[in-house]
Image: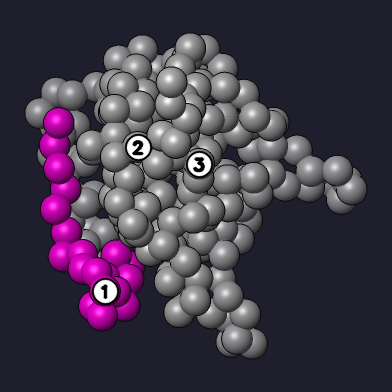
Amino acid sequence: PIVFGWPGSRDVCYFSAIRSAGSARVVCDFERVVRAIQLSGVKKMHILCHSLGAQILFNVLRRETNPFADIELCTVVLINPDSPLESFLARDYEILHAQCANITVYADHLDGALWYSEFFNRTTKGQRIKSLGRRPFDLLRSTNGAIECTPLDLDVIEVSWMDHNMHGMRHNFFDINRFVVSDLCEIFSSAKRACERTSLLHRHSNVYSFLNAPKHIVH
């Protein structure tokens, strides 16, 4: 695995991290990394983005220069993505799906960090900007003016109920939670969609959860 380290931040420096995720320097650096991997002979790639890392990926995909044109993007995993939901539905999903058909989003409506993201990020009218990672059941859209919405062609893993190996903010758990780690391994090794992975329970449309009882249920 290759880790793209960028000048992110947290807490009081959150807005500095947002500016960094959208800066030309960070976006260009990520594009250069992808091209370097490609030039080394790699033909297939899997991408995992956490939090604001999703915005970096979307910013790269919006550019006219497509670093993924000559490399197969097998899977894309977005974990608790801190990115505007409306922008994803209106633009970023189509761009991403055109590049990769196997997309997984881990979402948690109890994510404390994303709650603060929605509180501080607002429209010019003062309305909260919904975060992609806090809206597991909203990844659908109306097509051709239809009243009923259709789910996006991606897998949503809803982890709002999960309380094993989960800290208070519920934002950085994917590297210590056994269920998530095992699921990620299966995604990257087999490229199976959620409907094919036996550790998941189908909840609704494109939403799944892990087959595991809450920790308060004991023998």
Q: Name the residue type under label 2.
A: His
The front one of 142 and 64 is 142
* Image point (60%, 86%), residue name: 126
User: Residue under circle 1?
Assistant: 11
* Helix, strand or loop status at disc 1: helix
User: Of all residues shown, which one is farthest toward the left?
Assistant: 40
Q: Quadrant of the C terminus?
A: top left
The alpha-carbon separation of the residues under discs 2 and 3 comes to 10 Å
Q: Position of residue 6 (x, y in %)?
A: 16, 59
What amino acid does circle 3 point to?
Trp
Q: Give the magenta part as a residue range.
A: 1-23
Give the class, few, some or many, for how many residues have Cα within 10 Å of label 2's Cα (few <14, many ≥20). Answer: some
Q: Which residue is mark 2?
A: 164
Residue drawn at (53%, 79%), measured in percent from left and top? 122
Q: 140 left or right of 99?
A: right
Give the CA distance from mark 3 to mark 1: 25 Å
Q: Could you tell me if residue 146 is visible in this image?
A: yes
Residue annotated with mark 3: 161
